[in-house]
C-alpha cells in the first residue's frame, strides 16, 4: 500500500533523511524509533506529501506523490490519510462529536450520516456518552482518544502517529497505544508510529531505528 524508496531530505547543509526505504501493507502497524531531532516528524511530513523530498519516492497504491500537484495531494491526504499528534490538536470550541465529524464535514457528507459515523467511532475508542462534552472537560487520555477517533472516522488507508503519547502519563499512554494499534488493525490501515520510546514501539508488528545514517530494522 505504501512504498517509500530512497528518500533524501536536507535543510541547508544539514542532512535529515538519508536513503530511507520502507514498505507498509494494509493492516501492518510499524514503529520508527529515534532520538529527538533526528527527523521522525520530517519523515512523516514527506510521506504525507507535506514536505517535498530532495530525492526518492513515496508511492501510495502505486501513485507517486511527487507526481501530483498541490490540490491532488491535498485531496489524497483528506481522503486517504489520518493523523494523530502529540499535542492532540482538538479544536477547543467544538464538542467531541463535532471534532470527530470534522473530516467527514470537509468531504461534504450529509449531516445525518456524518454524525452517525462519528458516534460509532467515538464509541469504538471508549468515549460513548461523551459526544456533547467540550475538550476542556476531558482528561489528556480522553483528548487523545478524540484525536484517534477523528483520525480514523473517515476510514483512512494510512494512519500516521507522531509521538501520540508524549503528553500522557504511563497508564494513559499504555491504553492509547493499545487502542491505536487495535483500531489500525480493525480498519486494515497501513499504520506508522514515530516515537523516541522503545516501550511505545514494543507493540508494533515491525520496528525500525532512524538515525543520521538512515533507517534500519530493530531486532
Image (tube, grey):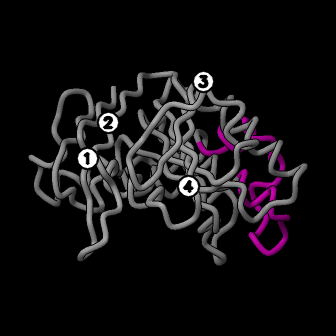
Q: Distance between the residues labelled 3 and 1?
A: 22 Å
Say whether residue 39 is magenta.
no
Can the viewer see residue 113? no
> What residue is at 67 percent from the left and 39 percent from the top?
201
Q: Distance between the residues labelled 2 and 4?
A: 19 Å
The quarter of the displayed image where residue 153 is located? top right
**Label 3 with label 1: CB-CB less than 8 Å:** no
> Against 131, is 119 above or below?
above
Q: Which of the numbered marks, if any, corresponds to residue 21? A: 2
Residue marked by disc 1? 7
Query: Residue 149's spot in the image, x, y percent?
Result: 63, 46
Earlier-in-chain disc, 2 versus 4: 2
Earlier-in-chain disc, 4 versus 1: 1
Task: Count how many numbered circles sit on residues in the image.
Answer: 4
**Label 2 with label 1: CB-CB less than 8 Å:** yes
Earlier-in-chain disc, 2 versus 1: 1
Question: Which of pointers 2 and 4 indicates the residue nearer the eye?
Answer: 2
Residue marked by disc 3? 205
- Near mark 3 (Cα within 10 A), the count class, few <14, some 14-19 or many ≥20, is few
Question: Which of pointers 3 and 1 indicates the residue nearer the eye?
Answer: 1
Query: Residue 210's spot in the image, x, y percent?
Result: 48, 47
Query: Residue 81's spot in the image, x, y percent?
Result: 40, 44
- Near mark 4 (Cα within 10 A), the count class, few <14, some 14-19 or many ≥20, is many
Between residues 131 and 194, which one lies in front from this camera angle? 194
The range drawn in magenta is 118-145
Can the viewer see residue 8? yes
Residue marked by disc 4? 162
Q: How far apart are marks 4 and 3 (CA)?
A: 17 Å
Q: Distance between the residues labelled 2 and 3?
A: 17 Å
- For residue 68, side relative to residue 197 (left or right): left
Between residues 36 and 162, which one lies in front from this camera angle? 36
Amino acid at each position: 500500500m505504501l512504498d517509500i524508496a530512497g528518500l533524501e531530505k536536507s535543510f541547508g547543509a544539514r542532512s535529515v533523511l538519508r536513503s530511507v526505504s520502507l514498505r507498509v501493507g494494509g493492516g501492518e502497524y510499524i514503529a520508527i524509533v529515534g532520538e529527538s531531532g533526528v527527523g521522525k516528524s520530517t519523515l512523516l511530513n514527506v510521506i504525507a506529501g507535506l514536505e517535498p523530498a530532495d530525492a526518492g519516492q513515496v508511492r501510495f497504491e502505486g501513485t507517486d506523490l511527487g507526481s501530483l500537484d498541490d490540490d491532488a495531494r491535498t485531496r489524497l491526504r483528506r481522503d486517504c490519510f489520518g493523523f494523530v499528534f502529540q499535542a492532540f490538536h482538538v479544536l477547543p470550541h467544538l464538542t467531541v462529536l463535532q471534532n470527530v465529524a470534522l473530516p467527514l464535514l470537509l468531504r461534504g457528507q450529509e449531516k445525518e450520516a456524518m454524525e452517525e459515523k462519528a458516534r460509532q467511532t467515538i464509541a469504538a475508542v471508549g468515549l460513548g456518552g461523551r459526544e456533547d462534552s467540550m475538550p476542556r472537560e476531558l482528561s489528556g487520555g480522553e483528548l487523545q482518544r478524540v484525536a484517534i477517533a477523528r483520525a480514523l472516522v473517515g476510514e483512512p488507508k494510512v494512519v500516521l502517529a507522531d509521538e501520540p503519547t508524549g503528553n500522557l502519563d504511563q497508564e494513559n499512554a499504555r491504553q492509547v497505544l493499545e487502542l491505536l494499534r487495535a483500531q489500525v488493525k480493525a480498519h486494515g490501515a497501513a499504520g506508522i508510529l514515530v516515537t523516541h520510546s522503545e516501550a511505545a514501539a514494543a507493540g508494533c508488528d515491525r520496528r525500525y531505528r532512524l538515525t543520521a545514517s538512515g533507517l534500519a530494522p530493530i531486532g
